[in-house]
Image (cartoon, rainbow, N blue to C red):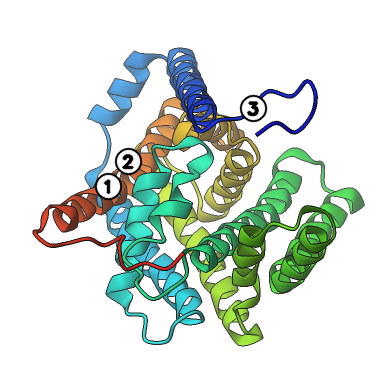
Amino acid sequence: METGVNSVPVTPAVSRTRRILVGFARTVIAVLTLYFVVESVSWKNVQSAFLSARLGPMAVGAVLLLLNLAARTRKWQMMVDSLRSGTTFAESARSLLLGISFGSVTPAEIGELAGRTLHLPGARRSHVVGLTLLDRLQIMLVWVLFGVGALAFLLMRPGPLQWLSVIAALIFPSIVAWRLDLLGRLGHAVNDRWMQRGWITRVLDGFSCLTPRVRARTLALTVGFHLILCAQLYAFVNAFAVVSVIDAVLAASAVMFVKAMLPISLADLGVREMAAVYFFGLVGVPAAAALNASLLLFVVNIVVPGTVGALEWWLVRSRPNTTPDAERQR
């Protein structure tokens, strides 16, 4: 449909082509960035670090995946339960894993929005999409909260400006994270005034589903999720080198912040590794150790649950008389 005299119709084929090109571009960026990071560190150093790695800390980081997924699943269960009571932990886990699976192979993890709507019969897809955006926004704000504070300690000289940055990082994201429902209201006002799109209204309705009590609990679980990520990176780094807990939390928080601010590659590959090499280098960790730890974090937290989610979905789809999409509401 044309929108003006000189406008070009945006057909489904054109839209699909754009998505494919964007996905291809992000994949190329991920591969090139990772290649240059590995080359700058030296592949021999990477191999040598892996061959001399300590298995104990590596195993601890891998086992922490269970705690990672448990925190995220419990949070997602509480959020979805606001839409339909009686949501089970198993349903929430399947929805979350499929979201990770779809998100890991799509630009900016946009596939997560579709993946999480599956395995949740009885819940409006548009509302689930709204809750997914709310979940991701909470995570983003927590990464800003910890990340900006970490950058202040890592990059700034001790003094009033450093502490002012830390205080600002603590206050502003906390207020926004606590009152995310206000963003939903603002979005409704903008949509009603200028855009008037029904699907946007339904998505934004998901922002208003959570009570203050549920918002507080989900925010606490988001902070817990971030600290688990820090613990995983701490364990993985200590498999190759030695780093203190405080330094690991600061560097890991900075890494999460940077990768969230630069969603330019597929599954954040390359960006996360480059940030890990830089920020852990500031606290004395060798580049090869930081790179290996970041790659392990990717494999454990993205590849493993994403594969499990895809396998579970394939098994469900392959069962006879199984049509999971037919009964879902739009």
In the rendered image, the vertical position of residue 61 relative to residue 107, given as above or below: below
Residue type (three-letter) at the residue carrying disc 3:
Pro
Residue visible at 63% across and 39% down in the picture: 258
Residue receiving disc 2: 299
How many other residues sit within 10 Å of disc 2, few (<14), some (14-19) or many (≥20)?
some
Q: How much space separates mark 3 and mark 1, taking CA atoms? A: 41 Å
Residue 103 pos. (x, y %):
42, 45
Q: Position of residue 95 (x, y in %)?
A: 35, 63
On the picture, is 43 further left or further right than 127?
A: left
Image quadrant holding the N terminus, namely top right
Pointer 3 or 1: first along the chain: 3
Residue with the mark numbered 1: 304
Q: Amino acid at mark 1?
A: Val
> Circle 3 sits in a helix, a strand or a loop, which is it?
loop
Q: Secondary structure at mark 1?
A: helix
Residue drawn at point x = 46 percent, y = 26 percent: 20
